[in-house]
């Protein structure tokens, strides 16, 4: 039984990696979060300014602590908000992310056709994934793999958005009901949707698929 499950996920990962590479992305598969951290540290210079996208995945695998121990400077708006930063300071950090040497984030969904689907509240995460940073690294657990774009958008509405809204204590209907109602709340986190179908001109994006479930 377990061998069949392993075989199934190996095939899905294989299809997704091949599609990402056909679409121009650098794509690799690692077995777990520890291996993902090691791969990211290989890709980012020790003196780089690293932009950190809003991502539970990065925190689950301990990437931020590993970068800080090594001496990298992080542009991390989540951390700034936790220490009571003003809205102006938070916005300044978000702009730093777009101009960073390396930007690390996860993705809301990656399709077996090699596309990256993301939905944002403010939009700086999707902006930094597309243009600005010298290097972009996207880390995704196998739970983020979907068949196509429609399934990826459904995944955001049905899973990622309600859980993120609840985690952030936002005043949205989905944070109460767990169901997307396409709301008009000021706290809505589904304001900007991006679909990266192929590597953008001049971009350098590495997708790291991790062989375990991570994030929302």
Image: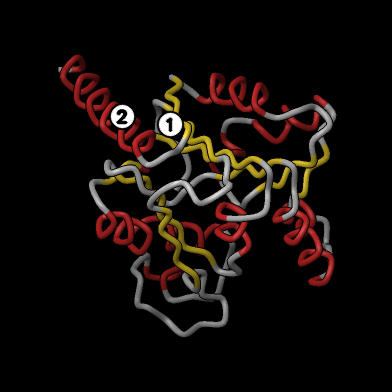
Q: Position of residue 12 (x, y in %)?
A: 25, 31
Residue 82, relative to residue 27: is it above or below? Answer: below
174 and 79: which is toward the camera: 79
Mark 1 neighbour class, 10 Å CA radius: few under 14, some 14 to 19, many 20 or more: many
Mark 2 neighbour class, 10 Å CA radius: few under 14, some 14 to 19, many 20 or more: many
Q: Quadrant of the N terminus?
A: top left
Q: Which residue is mark 2?
A: 13
The quarter holding residue 46 reads: top right
The quarter holding residue 24 reads: top left
Q: Are marks 2 and 1 in contact (CB under 8 Å)?
A: yes
User: Which label belongs to residue 183?
Assistant: none
Residue 173, relative to residue 127: is it above or below? Answer: below
* Secondary element type, mark 2: helix
Position of residue 172 in the picture relative to residue 87 (left or right)? left
Position of residue 110 in the picture relative to residue 89 (left or right)? left
First reached walking from the N terminus: tag 2 or tag 1: 2
Q: Residue at x 51, y 82 (%)?
A: 185
Q: Position of residue 71 (x, y in %)?
A: 85, 29
Q: Which residue is mark 1?
A: 209
Q: Residue at x 54, y 40 (%)?
A: 205
* Secondary element type, mark 1: strand
Q: Residue at x 31, y 30 (%)?
A: 18
149 and 214: which is toward the camera: 149
Q: Position of residue 141 (x, y in %)?
A: 42, 35
The residue most toward the bottom is 184
The residue most toward the front is 201
């Amino acid at each position: 039984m377990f061998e069949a499950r392993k075989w199934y996920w190996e095939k899905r990962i294989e299809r997704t990696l091949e599609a990402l590479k056909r679409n121009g992305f650098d794509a690799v598969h690692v077995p777990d979060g520890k291996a993902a951290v090691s791969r990211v540290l290989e890709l980012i210079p020790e003196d780089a300014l690293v932009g950190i996208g809003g991502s539970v995945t990065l925190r689950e695998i301990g990437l931020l602590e590993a970068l800080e121990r090594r001496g990298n400077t992080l542009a991390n708006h989540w951390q700034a908000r936790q220490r009571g930063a003003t809205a102006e300071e938070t916005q300044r950090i978000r702009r730093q992310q777009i101009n960073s040497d390396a930007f690390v984030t996860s993705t809301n969904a990656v399709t077996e056709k090699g596309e990256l689907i993301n939905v944002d509240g403010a939009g700086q995460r999707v902006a930094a994934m597309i243009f600005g940073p010298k290097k972009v690294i996207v880390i995704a657990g196998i739970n983020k793999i979907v068949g196509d774009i429609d399934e990826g958008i459904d995944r955001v509405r049905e899973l990622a958005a309600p859980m993120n809204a609840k985690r952030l204590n936002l005043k949205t209907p989905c944070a109460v009901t767990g169901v997307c109602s396409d709301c008009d709340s000021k706290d809505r986190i589904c304001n900007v949707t991006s679909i990266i179908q192929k590597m953008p001109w001049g971009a350098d994006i590495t997708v790291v698929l991790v062989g375990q479930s991570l994030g929302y």
